[in-house]
Amino acid sequence: MGMEACHSPSTGRLEVDASAMEASVTSAYSASNAASTSSYPPAPSPSLPDGLQANPIRTADPVTPLSEEEPSCPADMVLIEGEYCPGLVQPCLQWVEGGVRRCARFGESRCVGHRFYRRFCIDRYEYPNLVGVKPAVMVSWYDALRACEIEGKRLCLASEWTFACEGVQRYPYPYGSVRDRRVCNFDRPRPSPEPIFEKFARPREVGAEVARLDMRVESGVLQGCVSPFGVHDMTGNVDEWVINEDHFEAVEAEGKKPYISGLKGGYWGPIRAACRPITTAHNEIFRFYQVGFRCCTNTKKNSDGVADRYTFRLSEWRKRASLRPEGGPFERPPQP
């Protein structure tokens, strides 16, 4: 459970040797794709920054979204179904040089322990789930939870998010096993100057500061940054809030439980930005310039029922919660 996915005032500046990183990743990418012939159909490439490509050669099998005669998911969502492995070994064969520890090339993933059948729906794009629109940021976990509920959906469980990203193939990255900064919006240079944290507490200045730091791209523009199920932009672009199931599973005797809030996928900076990692360092009221979310829901038929197990637990947590954003959707428990 690393905590480097979000920059905080206590985090030192991360310097990245861009040329070394590019050489390392390009070498790994070329080796992996030597025998690959699958690619997206040629299409005019939009103007994208820092070497991002709209239609790159995939490092993995072609996307094969599940289909049904009677769709089990809303039109703006993707069906996720198959065997999910909670315990996964993913050996790193080559590391990116410089900066935060990131894997340039993974070996074959190996499942350890039991596998579980999962079936649910997830938003195709980051909220507001609209192609061609930049995802929302500066939202707290509370905001994300409420926004999904307003749409008749729910915030994703961490395990749901992970499975939707890696597929039944258990890829470390949604598009394969080799890190490629041309495919997804990550490994972009850190902003200069660094975020001025005082401005995030000043309503008249926060908007301009977020705009200065912003390196998001519009949802769906990176046609290669898609999971085996057909879910877009799961690594990079913005960090995504999820429900951290470990909060409910942790044993009290082991000490303080982890937050119910978790962040998946990483944002556009030089951070891990892979399917499996989760950041649990930020509480439910945390907001920042690179934090967004997407929603999930049960299928119309034959849902796996996993999320239902957390419904009661989540309602009980809400009753006990003493922190909420000012004007947020949850009231404090009544006082005796």
Image (tube, grey):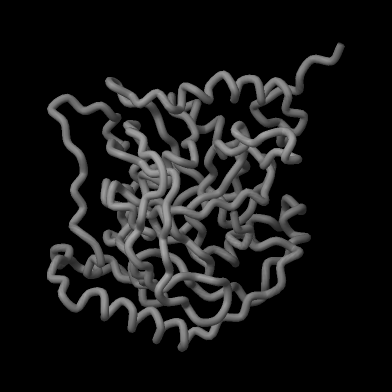
Q: Compared with residue 186, is residue 305 higher up or lower down, i.e. above or below?
A: above
At 14% across and 66% down in the image, what residue appears? 38
Q: Is residue 78 visible?
A: no
Would you place residue 61 above or below residue 52 in this image?
Answer: above
At a point 26% along the width and 51% down the height, the residue shown is 228
Across the whole image, how many numbered discs are drawn on residues?
A: 0
Residue occupying the point 26% across, 80% down: 31
Tell me what residue is drawn at x 35 percent, y 72 percent: 182
Judge from the rendering whether residue 294 lies leftward or rightward of residue 98; answer left or right. left
Q: Quadrant of residue 315?
A: top right
| Whether residue 231 can be seen here | yes
Residue 116 position in % (x across, y down) = 36, 35
32 on left or right of 132: left
Give the image location of residue 210, x and y in percent: 61, 59
Q: Nearer the viewer, residue 65 or 135?
A: 65
Image: 131 above or below 223: above
Q: State the quadrant of the C terminus.
A: top right
Task: Examine the image and state in which quarter residue 9 appears.
Answer: bottom right
List the single residue furthest toward the top. 336
Q: Residue furthest right?
A: 336
The N terminus: image quadrant: bottom right
Question: x and y percent of residue 12 in the render?
Answer: 71, 72
Frontmost residue, 237 versus 44: 237
The percent position of residue 174, horizontal first and vertical second, equals 34, 56
Q: Determine which quarter of the picture holds residue 305.
A: top left
